[in-house]
Image (cartoon, rainbow, N blue to C red):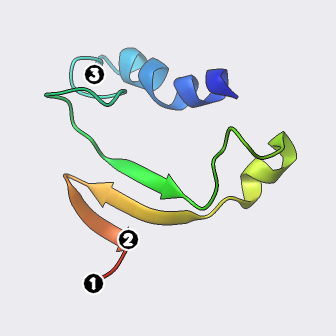
């Protein structure tokens, strides 16, 4: 599971030559992120496809979900 998440985050940023600004949550990096309905590390692999995106943040602003 961890390898799959890395493929979508740090490895993707590295491949796109954006490792300095994307791919991990660190001071000074862009922090677009999602909040999932369940912890992907705690559900069976075959249930990952059923997780829902509860909140999406882009540029520090909620663009999907959340309140208000």
Residue under the point 38% across and 15% down: 14
Q: Which residue carries the number 2 mark?
A: 64
Q: Do labels 1 and 2 touch, CB within 8 Å?
A: no
Q: Which residue carries the number 1 mark?
A: 68
Q: Residue furthest bottom?
A: 68
Residue 53 placed where, x, y %? 54, 62
From the viewer's side, name the closer residue of 23 and 40.
40
Q: Which residue carries the number 3 mark?
A: 18
Residue 36 placed where, x, y %? 55, 56
Q: What quarter of the picture does the C terminus occupy?
A: bottom left
Q: In the figure, 45 relative to 15: above or below?
A: below
How many labels were placed on the picture?
Answer: 3
Q: How far apart are marks 1 and 2 (CA)?
A: 10 Å
At label 2, counting other C-alpha atoms closer than 10 Å, the crowd grade (few under 14, some 14-19, many 20 or more) is: few
Residue 27 placed where, x, y %? 17, 27
Q: In which quarter of the image is residue 58?
A: bottom left
Residue under the point 63% across and 24% down: 2
């Amino acid at each position: 599971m961890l390898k799959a998440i890395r493929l979508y985050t740090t490895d993707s940023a590295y491949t796109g030559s954006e490792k300095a600004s994307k791919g991990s949550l660190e001071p000074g990096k862009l922090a677009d992120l999602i909040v999932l309905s369940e912890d992907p590390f705690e559900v069976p692999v075959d249930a990952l496809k059923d997780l829902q995106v509860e909140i999406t943040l882009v540029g520090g602003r909620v663009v999907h979900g959340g309140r208000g």
